[in-house]
Amino acid sequence: MPHIQIRDVPETLHRRLRALAEEEQRSLSQQALVLLRQGLTRVQGALGSRQELFERIRRRRVRWAGRRPNVTRLVREDRER
């Protein structure tokens, strides 16, 4: 299994990680791995959501291509209400 070494970890971050590892009854390495896995899952989920949003926008653009509404007419109609 591959190894990762992280250098120059700020003391406050190290203390927080150690305290959390003790609370969860894990080693420092196990706790770091759990947090890394959770963070990557969140980031990938956010990227997936962003990609889905871009895809929906792209589909909507294609659907509206060539038949865009007359914005001036819509504003006038709205003002006349």
Image (cartoon, rainbow, N blue to C red):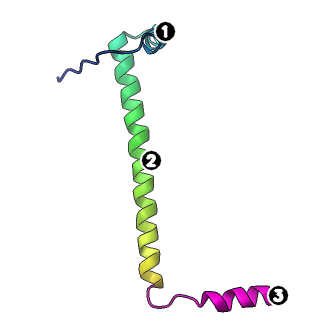
Give the crowd class for mark 3: few <14, some 14-19, many >=20 residues within 10 Å.
few
Determine which of the numbered discs, if any, sits on residue 19 in the image: 1
Give the crowd class for mark 2: few <14, some 14-19, many >=20 residues within 10 Å.
few
Q: Earlier in the sequence, mark 1 or mark 2?
A: 1
Q: Residue at x 74, y 90 (%)?
A: 77
Looking at the rendered structure, the kind of residue marked 1 is Ala
The residue at which mark 2 appears reads as 46
Q: Position of residue 79 (x, y in %)?
A: 78, 86
The residue at which mark 3 appears reads as 81
- Residue extending farthest right: 81
Q: Position of residue 15 (x, y in %)?
A: 46, 9
> Where on the picture, by quarter, is residue 61?
bottom left
Q: Are marks 3 and 1 in contact (CB under 8 Å)?
A: no
Q: Nearer the viewer, residue 66 or 28?
A: 66
Q: Residue at x 20, y 20 (%)?
A: 3
Q: Residue at x 41, y 14 (%)?
A: 10
The residue stretch that appears in magenta: 65-81
